């Protein structure tokens, strides 16, 4: 009887352990799935500050922080999702604008098919600074060159380590106008990147120099 009782107790304990592992695993999977589900905005509103060098459209309901644009301080803006897991940062850079102007002057009269737009060199240059600001920074693939309301624009996809652990993915964007150069960082949890890309693209395509 002792042997039989011990066997029954062992089976009960084993069954309980399996159930605990299953429910814990299910909860963890559900938690991970929730983390990978971002609330994709349905509406956008205009960002057009009285003082500053740029405006754009951003998701309705997001927090906006901005400053600069006077007193020698470059314009900057940051847009945060309600849970602050997704961010879009924009900052002006007069140095980059001066470099871009010099690059344009040097390339005037040259065959456009044989040269890269100045924004490409600035994009490469700005990578060094971003690497210092973001841990384990790594770009994926080559840059993408296209036109926005700002003019020539360079964009790279990158990954980085989140502050509290985990992985983040986003865009590093370099925009060049005739006067000011702007840098954008669009960032979200790695699992939400595909969902948030249209949001990032919307802001990039609507940003303009004031």
Image (cartoon, helix red, strand yellow):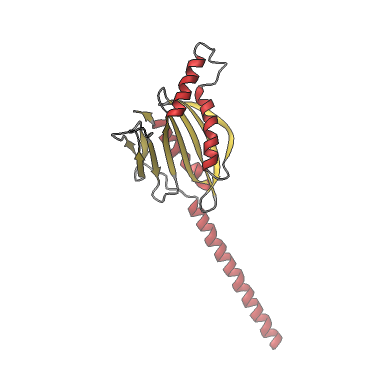
Q: Which quadrant holds residue 94?
A: top left
Residue 109 x, y percent position in the rendering: 50, 10
Quadrant (top left, top right, bottom left, bottom right) of the C terminus: top left
Using the image as rendered, state which of residue 150 and residue 14 is in the foreground.
150
Instruction: Judge from the rendering whether residue 179 lies leftward or rightward of residue 158; answer left or right.
Output: left
Residue at the farthest bottom position: 1
| Residue at the spot 55% in from the left edge and 61% down from the top edge | 26
Quadrant (top left, top right, bottom left, bottom right) of the N terminus: bottom right
Residue 74 x, y percent position in the rendering: 38, 33
| Residue at the spot 62% in from the left edge and 76% down from the top edge | 13
Is residue 196 at all visible to an observer of this figure?
Answer: yes
User: 8 above or below 158?
Assistant: below
User: 59 above or below 125?
Assistant: below
| Residue at the spot 62% in from the left edge and 77% down from the top edge | 12
Q: Which quadrant holds residue 127?
A: top right
Residue at the farthest front position: 71
């Amino acid at each position: 009887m002792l042997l039989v009782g011990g066997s029954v107790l062992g089976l009960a304990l084993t069954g309980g352990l399996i159930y605990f592992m299953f429910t814990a695993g299910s909860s963890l999977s559900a938690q991970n799935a929730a983390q990978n589900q971002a609330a994709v905005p349905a509406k956008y509103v205009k960002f057009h500050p009285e003082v500053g060098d740029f405006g754009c459209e951003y998701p309705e309901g997001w927090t906006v922080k901005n400053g600069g644009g006077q007193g020698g301080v470059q314009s900057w803006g940051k847009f945060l999702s309600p849970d602050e897991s997704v961010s879009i940062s924009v900052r002006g850079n007069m140095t980059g604008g001066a470099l871009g102007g010099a690059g344009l002057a040097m390339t005037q009269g040259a065959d456009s098919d044989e040269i890269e737009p100045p924004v490409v060199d600035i994009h490469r240059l700005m990578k060094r600074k971003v690497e210092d600001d973001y841990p384990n920074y790594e770009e994926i693939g080559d840059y993408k060159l296209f036109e926005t309301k700002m003019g020539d624009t360079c964009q790279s996809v990158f990954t980085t380590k989140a502050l509290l652990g985990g992985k983040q993915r986003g865009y590093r964007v370099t925009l060049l106008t005739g006067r000011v150069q702007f840098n954008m960082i669009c960032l979200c949890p790695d699992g939400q990147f595909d969902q948030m890309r249209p949001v990032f693209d919307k802001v990039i395509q609507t940003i303009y120099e004031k």
